[in-house]
Image (cartoon, rainbow, N blue to C red):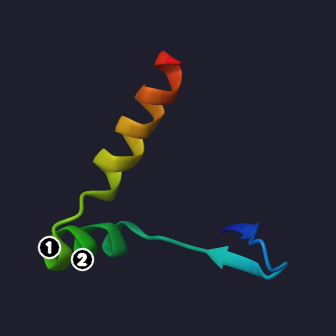
Amino acid sequence: MRSFTDNAGREWHIEITIQDVRRLRREVGVDLVEAVTSGLEASRAD
């Protein structure tokens, strides 16, 4: 599980399973894996 702290000082804990990724793609049409990998590729190009 990953966590981060927002600007208000609140700590958020994030856990995403492969089932969550599949459901997001199916129900919302967002491919989280593709979004993350394309973001990594873009940051490497900088």
Secondary structure under tag 1 reads helix
Asked if the residue under mark 1 is in contact with the one under mark 2, i.e. CB atoms within 8 Å, the reply is yes
Between marks 2 and 1, how big is the CA–CA gap? Answer: 5 Å
Identify the amino acid type marked 1: Arg
Question: What residue sits right under mark 1 in the picture?
Answer: 26
Tell me the number on the disc at residue 23: 2
Asked if residue 29 is positioned above or below residue 12 in the image, the reply reads: above
Q: In the drawing, does residue 39 fall left or right of residue 1?
A: left
Quadrant where the image shows the N terminus: bottom right
State which quadrant residue 13 falls in: bottom right
Q: Residues within 10 Å of mark 2 (few under 14, many from 20)?
A: some
Residue at image location 85% in from the left, 78% down from the top: 9
Toward the right, the furthest residue is: 9
- The foreground one among 41 and 16 is 41
Which residue is found at the position 34% from the left and 48% from the top? 35
Where residue 12 appears, as percent x and y from the top left, is: 70, 78
Image x and y of residue 2, in percent:
68, 65
Residue neighbourhood size for the residue with mark 1, other residues' Cα within 10 Å, grouped as few (<14), some (14–19), many (≥20): few
Identify which residue is drawn at 74% across, 67% down.
4
Q: Position of residue 7 (x, y in %)?
A: 77, 72
Q: Position of residue 20 (x, y in %)?
A: 35, 75
Which label number is shown at residue 10?
Answer: none
Tell me the element at label 2: helix
**Please, is residue 16 above or below residue 41 in the view?**
below
- Which residue is drawn at the image coordinates 32% and 67% (left, top)? 21
Q: Which is more toward the observer, 45 or 3?
A: 45
- Who is closer to the viewer here, 5 or 33? 5
Q: Identity of the amino acid at label 2?
A: Arg
